[in-house]
Amino acid sequence: MAPRKNKEQDIPAKKKNNNAYIAGAGTIIDQDVTETLKSNFMPYAMSIIVSRAIPEIDGFKPSHRKLLYTMYNMGLINGSTIKSANIVGRTMQLNPHGDAAIYETMVRLSEGYEALLHPFVASKGSFGKAYSRDMAYAASRYTEAKLAPISAELFADIDKDTVDFVDNYDATMKEPVLFPVTFPTVLVNSNMGIAAGMASSICSFNLKEVCETTIEYIKDNDINVADTLIAPDFPIGGELLYDRSEMERIYETGRGSFKVRGIYNFDKKNNCIDITEIPPTTTSEAIIEKVVELVKAKKVTEINDIRDETDLNGLKITIDLKRGTDAEKLMKKLYRLTPLQDSFACNFNILIAGSPKVMGVKEIISEWVAFRTECVRRKVYYSLSKAKDRLHLLKGLQKILLDIDKAIKIVRETAEEKEVVPNLMIGFGIDEIQAEYVAEIKLRHLNREYILKRLDDIERLEKEIEDMENILKSKSRVQKIIVGELSEVIKKYGKERRTKIVSSSEALSTETEEKEVDNSPVTVFFTHDGYFKKITPQSLRMSSEQKCKEGDFVTQTVETTNAAELLFFTSKHQVYKTTAEEFAETKASALGEYIPAKLDFDEGEVPIYMTVVDKYTGYMLFVYENGRISKVSLSAYETKTNRKKLIKAYCEKYPIFTPIYIKEETEIMLRSTNGRVLLVNSANVPAKGVKDNGGINVMTQKRGQKIEAAEIYVKGTIENENRLRTRTLPAAGNKPLGSSQDEMVLD
């Protein structure tokens, strides 16, 4: 087999000299990955951030701006709608990303889609719905559109040099860098975008509240925004769970979240719930799917059927209830378990001078006021320049009109046309521009009426120029113009809030709603070595013999429910709290779950006692080896928050023998290592409010003696039990009958 030639040898000499051949092409070189990312990925990432995903201070992304400006140029601010396909095709002169992306942009901006509080596109046909995942929009050839009336506020005086223009992608047209919007659209309509390494999520606010807040800010920069800008407002409505402090934090930092929930009506006659408004972050299909999932998992058992009854009247999800169902209670459960209540995460990230910046509401308003101030000043300066140019022409005309016969004579006696303007300049002492204007006046205008009107125009223009110059010098007059524009926007387009605000107390009651759990009966077992089992009655009937590790044994068996709380007291004077629901059901043949691992005990910490709690009633008795007993009300371990661990659960001064839970006052039997027994009523031990109190001395112990048994006494289990009782404490106790010593020990 012939040896393979080098690739470079295979290339003909003629091709090597051709421009198509690149020297070193295909050569692998070593390059630092950070340098590769910097040179290859960073330009792409910056393009996404600056030119695609993040909105600017006028409230628009480039794709929005290109579409709306094309529609403006097509004259769609007035008149009837035209086919969407026509608009999409024309927009491709500015937006080279294809018709599908352009049409999707139009859909989101349309009235029919219902994604914006104030849509900029008036639509005709099927444009889908923001609240439905499956309700698709029709193709562009079937729908029609035009600009909505409020879009006039986007293009106010755009032809008066209020904003900069740049070339489009092929330098055949000009397009605006920003829109000279007359109100803060960036806050009025929601806007979301995901860029490379950052994102933007701006919720919508009521137009009237935004404009009023901006007016108040212009008057006083130290305002509290939350006083006038109450809360976000969404086109689909819903209820916003209002927390003033959290809302102020969002307004201050531009980050945070709040909860929005759906609105429902209970139809008592048909025993069903009609959901007519949902959060802006979800869809009707997602809610229905989640409810069906919960019903199948038997976590929700009150529902017979759920269906989507959305029609031309709007959104409607109907839930048929089983007889006797509490509708309000069910809705609280659905709020907790489904997207019917959801959080809206705010991230007010906006491009300012080409750089992304996360800002609070007041800073956004400040930036918008600065932007609008510049637009107004540019408009006034443009009008001033035009007025000065016009005045300059009329001044020249004024000189001519002083001796019109002379002007006519100059024109008649000039031999060549090109000499008319220079001769007029010489004859009346005017410049070329003025002379050109005079030379172009029609013969029919050389009458008294025309002359007088032009002279009146001079006086009017002089007053206008003086006024515009004063505006440019006065910050307050520019602000007054902006305030006037905002007031006019409120008058034309202001609407009442759609999203209702739920008071903070009502919101708190919803958030702190107790979690419903399955309260079916179970039996729990706790072993000496710290293993725990939860077994159903059915499993116990099949096998009741409990399997334990070698040397381990069951110390506590309690019949309770799945909803019970469990308190595990430990060797390090702490108590860990959990619920029976947190443990999986098991069988008698299993070892169970190891509590220190399950509840994340401290190193070297072991459980010594389990208390099963249905209600925080009764007492905890702590029996110490030296014969002391402390008594603590169980309510001392109840917490309003979900704290999992409480420190100083009992006294640290004395070695603990065992805790004992009692539901009511009862007798406790204590036995010492000296063989003596004492029966003491728990009522004789005073309860104290401090968990780690030292208690009282109950059974006296001599040197080397300690408690070796402590338990709740069952009456009648010891013969002549009265011998073991005492009237005063402490006491040494007595030996039961039949022991080597049977004399009574005196107190």
Image: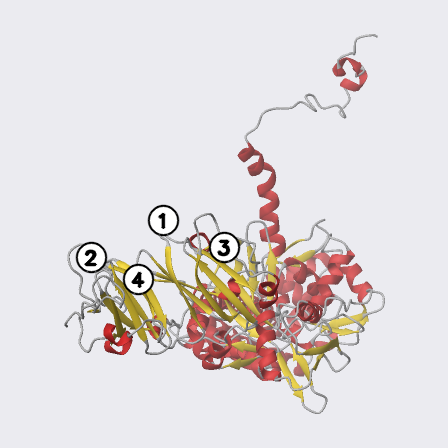
Labels 1 and 4: the sequence-earlier one:
1
- Residue mark closest to the camera, 3 vs 1: 3
Label 4's element? Answer: strand
User: Label 4 amino acid?
Assistant: Ala
In the picture as drawn, the residue positioned furthest to the bottom comes out as 269
Q: Amino acid at mark 2?
A: Gln
Amino acid carrying mark 3 in the image: Glu
- Give the image location of residue 345, x and y in percent: 54, 64
Question: Which residue lies under the disc numbered 4?
Answer: 709
Name the residue carrying label 1: 603
Residue that carries the numbered disc 3 in the rendered image = 593
Place of residue 347 in the rendered image (x, y in percent of width and height, measured from the top left): 52, 61
Dot 3 surroundings within 10 Å: few (below 14), some, or many (20 or more)? some
Observer-nearest of 484 and 604: 604
Along the line of sight, which residue is nearer the eye, 559 or 437? 559
Q: CA distance from mark 4 to mark 2?
A: 12 Å
Whichever of labels 3 and 4 marks the residue nearer the N terminus, that label is 3
Q: Is residue 262 above or below residue 593?
A: below
Please provide percent x and percent y for residue 212. Answer: 49, 79
Q: Tell me the element at label 1.
A: loop
Position of 468 with respect to 77 (left or right) is left
**Mark 4: few/some/many CA within 10 Å (<14, 14-19, 20+):** some
Image x and y of residue 379, in percent: 56, 68
The front one of 45 and 62 is: 45
